[in-house]
Image (tube, grey):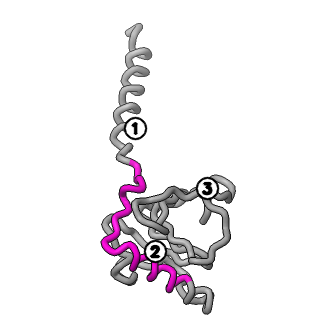
Amino acid sequence: MKNTPRLLLIGLLALLVVAAGAGCGKRPTPGDIVLAQPDRAVAEARRLIEEKRADPKLYPNWIEPHQLPEALRFPKLKCGIVHEDHMDLLIQRMPDWWVGARIWSANATRAHADAPTAYSNVFFFTYTNDEPDSPSNIR
């Protein structure tokens, strides 16, 4: 019985290691952004951005994939969000963390540190509300 606390601690640590490993899947990367018609996707996103600028009440919420223009749909897409100067296409969304593709308006001036993807004018981004807004953390 002398080793019971030690064995219990070792067992608990082993359980934590297994649980952490099971919950850790492959994190999204720019390679997860797969567009069939990237030029058309950029044009459609920019059209939605311009519509939102003309009427800020448009697209107030998440847009489900089936509600988006076909060119903006791709595997793993969860939803789209139209902002005043960019559009986000989320592939992973948790309460404090968003990941996906981002397309900026043609005349966007905001500094950003989004990662490039395989497509011109389509970027990969991550956002967390746990960090302050910055060029690498834009909502």
Task: Residue 100 in the image: state x and y as whole percent.
Answer: 45, 62
Residue 82 lies in magenta, yes or no?
A: no
Labels in figure, total: 3
The answer to whether residue 94 is seen in the rendering is no
Q: Would you name the residue on which mark 3 appears?
A: 136
| Label disc, if present, on residue 20 of the rendered structure | 1
- Amino acid type, mark 3: Ser
Task: Residue 36 in the image: state x and y as whole percent.
Answer: 30, 72
Height in image: 61 above or below 12? below
The residue at the point 39 percent across, 31 percent down is 17
Q: CA distance from mark 1 to mark 2?
A: 30 Å
Residue 30 lies in magenta, yes or no?
A: yes
Q: Nearer the viewer, residue 15 or 110?
A: 110
The residue at the point 45 percent across, 70 percent down is 89
Tag in front: 1 or 2: 2
Q: Nearer the viewer, residue 11 or 96?
A: 96
